[in-house]
Image (cartoon, helix red, strand yellow):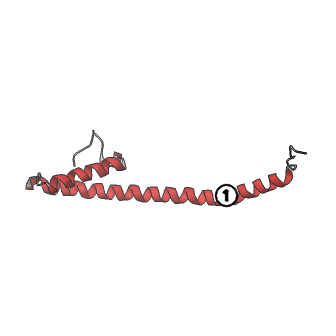
Amino acid sequence: MSKSKGKTAKDLRYGEAAARLEQILGQIEEGEVDIDELSGLVEEAARLVTLCREKIQAAEVQVKTITEQLERAEPEETEGATEAAAESPPLLDPRD
């Protein structure tokens, strides 16, 4: 597999991996790939697809975890705000 800026596949960011995939697809679609190089590029593309899927799944798990944490925290914050509002004195009307 060719390396992007000296990085291994695992070091690539999602955007870098996706860009490399597009580059490979473009080469293949344009017929720029020698038949001897084709299998190597297809193999690299398969690794990049796997890497992208793993990164998407990891991001989904992180987002779900954060969302669940926020949902659990909301009732506590809402209760605290309600209690604080009940304890604070009423606002005075400046017209009084």
Q: Is residue 13 left or right of residue 46?
A: right
- Who's the residue at 21% across and 57% down the image? 43
Query: Mark 1 belongs to which amino acid?
Result: Glu
Q: What element carries label 1?
A: helix
| Residue nearer the viewer, 88 or 37 | 88
- Who's the residue at 76% across and 53% down the image? 81
Residue farthest toward the left in the current orientation of the protein: 35
Q: Is residue 32 left or right of residue 61?
A: left
Q: Name the residue under label 1.
A: 74
Q: Is residue 76 above or below residue 4?
A: below
Point out residue 31 in the picture as x, y percentages from the top left corner: 11, 55
Kindly indicate the quadrant of the structure image that contains residue 49: bottom left
- Who's the residue at 32% across and 47% down the image? 16
| Residue nearer the viewer, 47 or 68 | 68
Point out residue 61 in the picture as x, y percentages from the top left corner: 49, 59
Point out residue 38 in the picture as x, y percentages from the top left corner: 13, 56
Q: How many marks?
A: 1
